[in-house]
Amino acid sequence: MGGPLQRPAKLAVATAHRIVADIDREGLRPGDRLPTEVDLQERYDVSRATLREALRLLEVHGVLSTRAGRTGGAVVRTPAAAELGAVLALTLQFADAPYSSVVETRQAIDPLLARFAAERATDDELDRLRDLLAELAGQEHGDPVGFLRANRAFGTALAEATHNPPLQLFAQALSEIISTRFTSEARNLRGRERVVRARRRVLEAVRARDPRAAEAAAADYVAAYDAVVAGPAPGLLATRVSWPMPR
């Protein structure tokens, strides 16, 4: 490990790549600390400014978090769907993509999630989905934002039950983009019971290990969600996707 780089161009980016490679090679897990700045400077043979730029880059991408103080430093974390969603939203903004295109993509993906979950979900994941559905039903007449959060939690658990990391992360990134925009506009959300019924049918099909029924139920869910959440705000669908501010 270590040794000087031969090319100075984009040194901070190259250093960030080397840090990631060492995290992977050494088997570091979320919560593990990196060596001190002094040790990292020596390891990668870079200046303090270059190292800090590399660490900031990795922090932006969700690979590290930094803590101040004597017990601080760089700590490994796992990049989350929120980071992917932010990068995707920024890319879509410059592609002039409207929110309707994100919704359309989710319409294509949700049935696939349900089908894979019906084929692959573990018993523990099915129990988790059951509990989340109960929480969603409990929000049927409550705060609209709470309802949307509960619905999103069910969707996240369903995506995890596919055991397909790329599909899971992409679906969650799309959900991040949609929920960031529509949650801020949530008002009464009339017809929430339709969303709950559709989610219940999805879970019933997944529990029955019936992929086709799960796909059909998920398509019905997407239609219900769009009618209840997106329908009352048609103007939002035509607006261009924008890069969200960090929360």
Image (cartoon, helix red, strand yellow):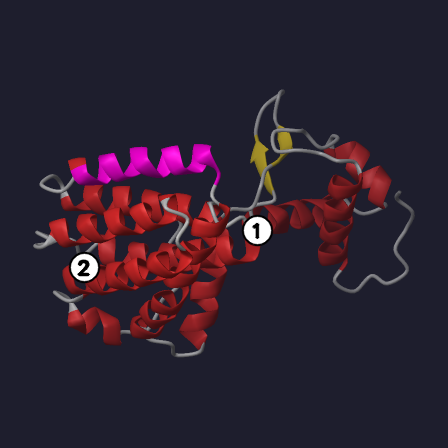
Q: Which residue is mark 1?
A: 61
Residue at horizontal 75 percent and vertical 31 percent from the top = 35
Q: Is residue 86 visible?
A: yes
Q: Name the spot of residue 39 as percent of width and height, x first.
A: 81, 33
**Dot 2: element:** helix
Q: Residues within 10 Å of mark 2 (few under 14, many from 20)?
A: many
Relative placement, left or right, of 10 versus 136 is: right
Relative placement, left or right, of 215 versus 44 is: left
Which label's residue is closer to the chain start, 2 or 1?
1
In this view of the protein, which residue sits in the foreground, 89 or 193?
193
Where are the magenta residues, as a range?
122-137
- Tell me the tag on residue 69: none
- Please determine whether, in this image, residue 199 is positioned above or below residue 39: below
Residue at horizontal 57 percent and vertical 30 percent from the top = 67
- Please determine whether, in this image, residue 222 is positioned above or below residue 82: below
**Dot 1: element:** loop
Principal secondary structure, stretch drawn in magenta? helix
**Cα distance, mark 2 to mark 1?**
30 Å
In this view of the protein, which residue sits in the foreground, 237 or 9?
237
